[in-house]
């Protein structure tokens, strides 16, 4: 189990740590997950949440702790939540510091089950987040039926957003929608100052990615505060310049000979 911070660049503080599945000896989550199937996978998923909470308590984490549901694990939403809350009570980790992330980027998950997991958590006063938003299969149509507290913009949208007009346009629409619906936005997979500053310009202030810190196994990683300062400074310069939105209105096409 590893932890990666989600940084609030406005306050230069850690908003949350996401607990990520990582082999202790290094490597990728898929090295472990590929070996998990069926009930095995469900048990492992639950074990990961318990482990994350225990470690967070040991590390005296005083921000939010964001924990995941693994793709393709099948759930009894109520029992699953109860076991997780039990683990938190047992480790004396405050329940109000928990965030539950569920990915929408999962073709096999049935949408009713997805909503059931979310509803169960919300009814119990938990903070919910849709993970990998913008990369998935249901996206906007799902939002019509269910609004989480947080949306995490997928790294596919973040990547090179400063040079990609289409990605900027999509991200801007997501931010605007989230503002209307009172949903918090986190940008995932931020690797460069340019990406972060562009997203900052669109109104995002919560960031996760290698630019600020890589996940650290069973510990809280060092945060690259120089990156936070760089994003903050570049954003201030843009504000001082009074930069207009980067996306101009589409020019009306002229008729031939017009
Ligand atoms: Ca996640």
Image (cartoon, rainbow, N blue to C red):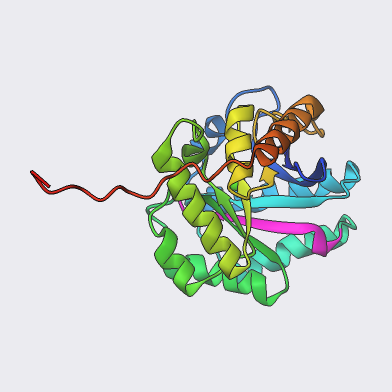
Residue drawn 59% across the image and 42% down it: 199
Residue 257 vertical placement versus 123 (above, below): above
The residue stretch that appears in magenta = 94-105
Question: Left or right: where does residue 152 sit relative to residue 207?
Answer: left
Q: Is residue 88 magenta?
A: no
Residue drawn 58% across the image and 50% down it: 152
Q: Is residue 99 magenta?
A: yes
Residue 103 showing in the rendered view = no
What quarter of the picture does the N terminus occupy? top right
Q: Residue furthest bottom?
A: 123
Residue 238 showing in the rendered view = yes
Residue drawn 48% across the image and 67% down it: 143
Percent x, y of residue 189? 58, 36
Residue 31 vertical placement versus 112 (above, below): above
Depth order, front residue of 24/175: 175
Percent x, y of residue 206? 69, 46
Q: Quadrant of residue 120?
A: bottom right
Depth order, front residue of 58/101: 101
Count up the numbered dots.
0
Percent x, y of residue 235? 69, 37
Question: Left or right: where does residue 195 sit relative to residue 88?
Answer: left
């Amino acid at each position: 189990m590893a932890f990666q911070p989600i940084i609030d660049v406005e306050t230069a503080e850690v908003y949350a740590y996401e607990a990520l599945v990582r082999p202790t000896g290094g490597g990728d989550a898929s090295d472990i997950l590929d070996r998990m199937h069926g009930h095995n996978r469900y048990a492992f998923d639950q074990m990961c949440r318990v482990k994350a909470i225990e470690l967070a308590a040991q590390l005296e984490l005083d921000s939010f702790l964001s924990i995941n549901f693994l793709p393709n694990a099948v759930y009894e939403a109520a029992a699953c939540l109860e076991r997780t809350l039990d683990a938190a009570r047992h480790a004396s980790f405050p329940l109000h510091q928990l965030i539950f992330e569920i990915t929408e980027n999962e073709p096999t998950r049935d949408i009713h089950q997805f909503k059931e997991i979310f509803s169960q958590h919300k009814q119990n006063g938990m903070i919910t987040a849709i993970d990998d938003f913008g990369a998935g299969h249901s996206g906007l149509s799902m939002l019509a039926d269910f609004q989480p507290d947080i949306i995490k913009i997928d790294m596919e949208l973040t990547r090179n957003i400063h040079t990609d007009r289409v990605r900027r346009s999509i991200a801007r629409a997501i931010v605007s929608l989230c503002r209307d619906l009172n949903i918090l936005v986190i940008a995932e997979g931020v690797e460069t100052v340019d990406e972060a500053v562009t997203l900052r310009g669109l109104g995002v202030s919560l960031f996760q990615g290698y630019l600020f810190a890589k996940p650290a196994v069973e510990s809280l990683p060092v945060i690259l505060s120089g990156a936070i300062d760089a994003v903050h400074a570049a954003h201030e310069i843009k504000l001082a310049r009074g930069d207009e939105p980067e996306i101009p209105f589409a020019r009306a096409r002229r008729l031939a000979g017009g």
